[in-house]
Image (cartoon, rainbow, N blue to C red):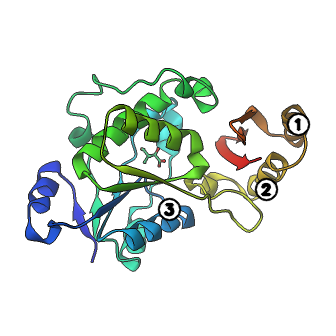
Amino acid sequence: MTKIIKTISEWKQLKKSNAFKEKKIGFVPTMGALHSGHISLIETCINENDISVVSIFVNPTQFNDLKDLERYPRTFENDLHLLEKFKVDFLFYPGAKEIYPDNFKYRVVEDELSKILCGAFRPGHFEGVLTVVLKLLNIIQPDRAYFGEKDYQQYKLIDGMCKAFFLDIEIIPCPTIHEEDGLAMSSRNVLLTKEERKLAANFPRLLASEKSAEEIKSELEKLGFKVDYIAGLEGRRFGAVHIGKVRLIDNVEL
Ligand code: PAF
């Protein structure tokens, strides 16, 4: 059985118990709507630690667009079913008041990487991500925390934050899991219509192609995508596109 913990005090109390003594805690933070990408993080976390904790918290401060927050899929029953199936020990499932007693007055700001790629198109997004992740890491106090490489910029920023603030937590990147047609698994994929979903497969195909960033952008636009950016950085190519109301991101090693 996966035990659901809703408050910080409950978790702190539990952590004092003998069952936690000298045990390694692995942590997978999520916003729910769990899919095979999350499951692969969860399986790695379970394999590498004595105690596994998953959090589900749709973090309002990382949504720069209120409509995007409202549309974000919420599938709690199914998520819990999956966590139980994979024998996750604890689900941390707090409300917004538990996480933001300060009303987001205190924030983590990064000045370089968070301003480019997705950061340039989603003002404040990474402030929200870094702030909530720091809070979650401080609450759970895991030995290791797992993040998907689909959100590579997010992973790098979280890793950098932990180093900058001397957090004694190993940040572990896990490879992106793809659908059969190459589309990176994302909670947002379920929001695509059938036609949009078909079209979406062109994004990872072109991103991984030999073509230049400019050529990829122009081909995607011809196909009907709205392209935020296609850009190379540190041996990877990053992209963010919109199909209808849904924003997709991905990256590939070059
Ligand atoms: O990647 C996500 O799902 C979120 O950005 C995270 C890391 C759980 C923070 O809300």
Please tell me how crowded label 2 is: few (under 14), some (14-19), or many (20+) other residues with Cα within 10 Å: some
Q: Quadrant of the N terminus?
A: bottom left
- Helix, strand or loop at mark 1: loop
Using the image, determine if residue 244 lies above or below residue 34: above
Comes first in the chain, label 2 or label 1? 2
The residue shown at (52%, 67%) is 40
Name the residue: 78% across, 48% down: 203
Return the residue at label 2: 201
Mark nearer the viewer, 3 or 1: 1
- Residue type, label 1: Ser
Q: Nearer the viewer, mark 3 or mark 2?
A: 3
Please state which amino acid type lies under the numbered disc 3: His
The residue wearing badge 1 is 212
Quadrant position of residue 138 = top left
State which tag comes first along the sequence, 3 or 2: 3
Helix, strand or loop status at disc 3? helix
**Distance from the alpha carbon under mark 2 to that under mark 1:** 18 Å
In the picture of the structure, the residue carrying the numbered disc 3 is 38
Amino acid found under the numbered disc labelled 2: Ala
Between circles 2 and 1, the one closer to the viewer is 1
User: Contact, CB < 8 Å: mark 3 with mark 2?
Assistant: no
Q: Name above or below for residue 184 compared with residue 119.
A: below
In the depicted structure, whether residue 252 falls above or below residue 220: below
